Image (cartoon, helix red, strand yellow):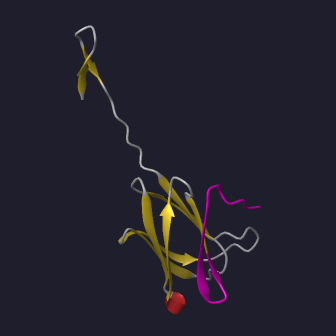
Amino acid sequence: MARTSARGRAESWRFDFAMPTLHVALQEGFVGDRVLLKVNETEVARREGVSTKNQIGLAEAVEIDVPQGPVMLDVRVVRGDLAARLSVDVGATPFVGVSIVGGALTLTPQGEPFRYL
C-alpha cells in the first residue's frame, strides 16, 4: 500500500499481520494414542503414537497458528473415543494443557507456558 507523505512523496507502507500461536501441550495419561486437534472445525494436527514421558509429564507440544480473536479448540483421542472442546482467547490464554485424567480429557488454558522438569 502506498501513502503520500506531507512532502508529496509516495511512501511504502508494509503491514505485517502475524497470526497468534496457540500452544497445545499433550501432557499426562497418553499411552501410544492417536490425537486429533481441530480449530474452528478444521483439523490442524494429527499425531500418532503419543505417549507421556512420565519423568517430565509431557508427551508432545503442538504449535498452531490461529486467527485473531477467540477460537474453538477440539481435541479427540481415538482410544476410548475421548473428546473435549474449549473456547480459547489466544490473546489471554495462548497455552492449553491436555491430559487424560480418570478416563476423561481435561483441557487447561493458561496465560503462561507450562513448566517441565
**The N terminus - image quarter:** top left
Percent of width and height locating residue 51: 62, 77
Percent of width and height locating residue 99: 63, 77
**The C terminus - image quarter:** bottom right
The residue at the point 57 percent across, 58 percent down is: 93
Reply above or below: 70 against 28.
above
The residue at the point 23 percent across, 11 percent down is: 9
Q: Nearer the viewer, residue 58 or 72?
A: 72
Q: Quadrant of residue 112?
A: bottom right
The residue at the point 62 percent across, 80 percent down is: 30
Percent of width and height locating residue 31: 62, 83
Which residue reaches farthest top?
7
Magenta-drawn segment: 99-117
Residue 65 is left or right of residue 23, and the answer is left
Q: Nearer the viewer, residue 17 or 64?
A: 17
Residue 13 is left or right of residue 115, and the answer is left
Residue 80 is left or right of residue 114, and the answer is left
Percent of width and height locating residue 19: 42, 49
The residue at the point 46 percent across, 51 percent down is: 20
Which residue reaches farthest bottom?
80
How many marks do you count on the picture? 0
> Magenta segment: does it hold 75?
no
